[in-house]
Structure formats: C-alpha cells, structure tokens
Amino acid sequence: MLRRLPLVALLGAACASPSLAPPPGLAICGDGVAQASEDCDDGNDDDDDACLRTCETPARFVPSDPHLHGHGCGGDLDPSDLVGLLSGRGIEVATPLVWGDGYDEDRGFFTGQDASVSRPGALLHYEMEISHFPAAQTGHLLLYGLRSIDFSSSPFTRPRSGLPVNDWARAQGTQVVVGMAHGEFWPTGGRFPELPETCCMPYDFLPEAIRGRVTFIGTEHREGVPAVDAPTAFLHRIALSAGARVALTGASDFPCINHTLNNDTIRTDVLLDGEVTYSAWLAALQRGRTTVAVRRGANMNLRVDGARLGDEVQVRAGDTLRVTIETSLPAPADVQIIANGSPVAVAHMPAGHQAGAFKVQADRSLWIQAVAPWVATSPIYVVADGHPIRGALADICYAMRYQDHLIRGVERRQLDLGDETDLALAAYREVRSELARRFTEAGGTTCP
C-alpha cells in the first residue's frame, strides 16, 4: 500500500524543510557542503546555476526524433534535407528509419555510422523500422544500433511475424535497442485490438515486454493531445503492472503521422551526461533515460533517492523515498507523481526552470514516473525487500486475457503468421503461463 505524505514543492534556500530533515549524520541539503548523497550543495535556491535547490546537478536534455523517414508516405528527402529540417526544430539527434515504403531510396543511406552530413547539434543516423513488410503485421519494430538491415533475403515475402526479426536484431550486439511504435492506436476501456487491424497495431508489445525483448513503447500522435496519449499510457501501465521494464518515447513519424514539423511536434528528450554521440545516446535510450515531450523547451526530470530515470532503487518496505523533480514549463502547471499507475502526489510548478522535492512512502515495490501537461518521464523502479514490482491485479489479468485473445486470433488465422505460426504460438503460450504465475504471486485468485 502506498501512503501519501506531505508534499514539499519548491524548497527554500536551505532545502531543509522539517519534513525533509535527515537523521543525524546525514547530508543536509542547503548547508553549502556537498556530501556523498548530494551531487552538489551551493547553499542557495537559484535553479538557473549549476546546482539545483535539491542539491542535484541540472539534467542535460537532448531533444531527439527517433522515428521519421526520408522517403515513403510521399516524402522525398535525402540526409541533407533532413538535417536542415530538424535543425529548425532544435532536434539534436534523429534516426531516419529505412522501411518498406521508400525502401530502395533509403536503404543506401544506411551505413551503421552517423550520416556524413551530421554536424554538432544535428546528428543523423539511419536505422530500421519493420513496416510495410509482412513481418510488420504483429507490430512495427523500431531497431537501433544495427550493423546490417538485411533481416531477410526476401523481406517483402517473409517472415510474417516480427519475432524472428527481433532475434536477428538482438544477435547483432549488446547495444542494439528494440522497441515498438504506435502505442497511440491501442484501444482503451479494457478492450482488445481487433485481429487484424489495417495498420500499425503493436500486437507483440505486451508479450515481448514480458519476455524482456523490447526496451520501449513509442507514441507518434499528432498535435493537440498531452505528451503521452491515453492509449499509450494505458498500454505502458499494463506492461509495468505485469512486471515489465519499458521506457517511453515520442516521435514524429514524419511524414506519415505528422505531415509537418514544428516546435510542438512530439519528441523524445534523452538525458545524457557529457558529449552527445550516437553511442552515448543509444546507451541512454537502452537504460530508459527518456522523457516524451511536446512544445519546444518543455522539459522535466525525475529522481528517486538520487536514482535516475530507468534505474532501480533498493529499499526496505516502509522506507520513505525522497522524490525530486526538475521542470522547465511554458506556464504554471500541476506535475503528478504516479506510483504503480496511481497518483500519489501533485506539485504545482511555476513556469520556467524550477526544482522541488517531496516524500513518498512505499510499503511495497513500485515504479514511479512524473507526468505534466507537456511532458512525461519514463519510470524509476523501486524494489522493496527484493520483491518484484507488481501493479493492480486487474492490469495483470488484462495482460493474461490479451494473451488468450492473441493466441485465439493466431490459431484461427485471423492473424495469419504463415511459417512463423508455431514459433509465435509457443512464445505467446509461454508468456500466458508466466503471467498466470505472476498473477498468483501478486495475490490473484480468479481472472474474470
């Protein structure tokens, strides 16, 4: 059970509100002495210098577009065109994806290295999306860190499932990152996606997340909705409740989903320390150091007991967690702290660069993320007494019933996976069995 504790937002110069006063012998934020548990301590409440009032160093946000195309969907842009377009949005890292539409035009730009037109502040690196291929009918895989994009000798005829493509990609090295696109198409209200949909449904996201074979779920929604749309937030919550560890990303999918690009187009901010290189960017993506944002300059970071996005924190059940946020918002807004899918605290943050801290007590293992109108973070994972993270039983039950739905659809050839049918059914049944074990472990008895 999570118990809400008093919120302490926008701490004073000493960062030593009584509700945050540490036990004797521990660091006191704001005393001007940086100790082991602090990044820094300059004794002031100026968040625009090199040390936040929370005694943490400011985050380095690298605006990124990890899913766009030069060709296809009517696009006709070569690398030099894309660099100019992205620079106008302040995008520092972009990954144009080779896919089935525009395949012949774009595949020659893939080298496994940064595009030659890249320059400081505008890094371009071609990668691969499984879309407009038969393998895409189980969802659009986004593949980064590849040495080769030749996933099949006949990509327009086989395979008919993304599972062997995931195997092929992951075999290329430990820095390969695999995710799935289009969480925005997932149905809400407890429904399951129809089999088949006409395009883009991430059918394999939940089973691959449970198997630990995808790093993130992406959303590519158009303007006019919060940073993380309701379908993607729902799908992400289901995966986390069932024990998966997956980050969030946002991207334009230009020119397909977003036909134009501007300062409000959805993006991914990747948190980096040091020089911006593709290798460092890829490693941060792999670790879940991401936020999804709309509106240029809107940023947010979250830390739990000093741990960063994507990290794991080991605690004892009942421990009090120090949760800090760093925001740069275009207008005053409420920031919600979400723990295991439920709001546990709200901080009203002024516009501009601000930091704040508060407490959350955890009586069990949980994931924590922060959500504001223009930006949402990936989770931090809190493990209490070594117990696995499990969310609401209803969420785990949904994941179990979705596996039944998927298995039936493949068995009846509603989703015709051809030669990959047996491979897919074996994987889906394995996940269904594992979910049943986790449901029972979490105290469930009957899944209606």
Image (cartoon, helix red, strand yellow):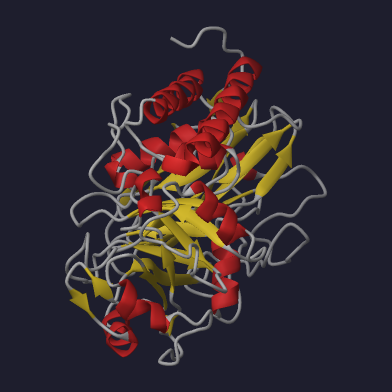
At x 50%, y 24%, the residue is: 396
Observer able to see residue 344: no
**Res 220 → quadrant:** bottom left
Q: Position of residue 144 (x, y in %)?
A: 51, 66
Residue 93 locus on image (x, y percent): 43, 76
Q: Quick check: 71 above or below 288?
A: below
Q: In which quarter of the image is residue 197?
A: top left
Please indicate whether residue 431 sits to the left or right of residue 103 in the image. right
Q: Give 115 or 353, whichever is nearer the viewer.
A: 115
| Residue 53: % across, % down | 55, 61
Side (left or right) of 50 relative to 383: left
Q: In this view, does 376 lie above or below 441?
A: below
Can residue 91 be seen in the rendering of this structure? yes
Q: Nearer the viewer, residue 218 or 70?
A: 70
The tally of labels here is 0
Give the quarter of the figure containing the C terminus.
Answer: top left
Pick the residue in front: 314 or 91: 91
Identity of the residue drawn at 43% across and 67% down: 128
Residue 281, image x, y percentages:
54, 71
- Left or right: 284, with 134 as reference point: right
Horizontal side of residue 46 vs 280, given as left or right: left
Which residue lies most toward the right here?
25
Q: At 64% across and 20% down in the image, what residue appears?
A: 437
Which image quadrant: the N terminus?
top right
Corner quadrant of residue 280 = bottom right
Residue 330 to residue 188: above or below: below
